[in-house]
Amino acid sequence: MTQSARAYRNPYTRTPGSSTPGPEVTPEEGRKELWGFFWLSVANTMIITVAGVGTWLIIH
């Protein structure tokens, strides 16, 4: 088994309600989740910006 195929062992213990990935998450899966979160954050920021500008234009 190669190093990249091995599961990453998270040094932190999981707590109830924690979003910490389990110890069986590979580095590739972790990077994929981080990129997904990044694009979700960008989309949310754009939605809030468009809504704010639209509201400002309607008010003024």
Image (cartoon, rainbow, N blue to C red):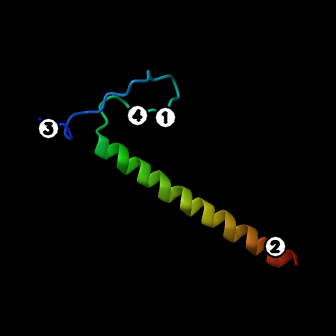
Q: Which residue is mark 2?
A: 56
For the residues labelled 2 and 3, the Cα–Cα distance comes to 55 Å
Q: Determine whether label 4 and label 1 are within 8 Å by CB.
A: yes
Give the mark nearest the N terminus, 1 or 2: 1
Residue 56: x and y in percent read 81, 73
- Residue at horizontal 19%, vertical 37%? 3
Residue at x 79% of width, y 71% of height = 55
Q: Residue at x 28, y 39 (%)?
A: 26
Which quadrant would the N terminus be assigned to in this image?
Answer: top left
- Give me the C-alpha separation between circle 3 and circle 1: 27 Å
* Secondary element type, mark 2: helix
Cα separation, mark 1 vs mark 2, equals 36 Å
Amino acid on which disc 3 is placed: Thr
Residue 22, image x, y percentages: 37, 30
Residue type beneath disc 2? Trp
Residue name at image x 14 percent, y 38 percent: 2
The residue lying toward the viewer, choosing from 11 and 43, is 11
Give SS at disc 1: loop
Label of residue 2 in the image:
3
Q: In the rendered structure, are the residues bearing label 2 and label 4 in contact, judged by CB atoms less than 8 Å apart?
A: no
Question: Relative to 3, does residue 43 appear above or below in the rendering?
Answer: below
Residue 53 relative to residue 34: left or right: right
Cα separation between marks 4 and 1: 6 Å
Q: Which residue is mark 4?
A: 21
Instruction: Give the residue pinned by disc 1.
Output: 19
Comes first in the chain, label 3 or label 4: 3
Whether the residues at callouts 3 and 4 have beta carbons within 8 Å, the answer is: no
In the current view of this chain or complex, which residue is farthest to the left?
A: 1
Q: Could you say which is closer to the camera, residue 19 or residue 38?
A: 38
Q: Amino acid at mark 1?
A: Ser
Tag nearer the camera, 3 or 4: 3
Q: Secondary structure at mark 3?
A: loop
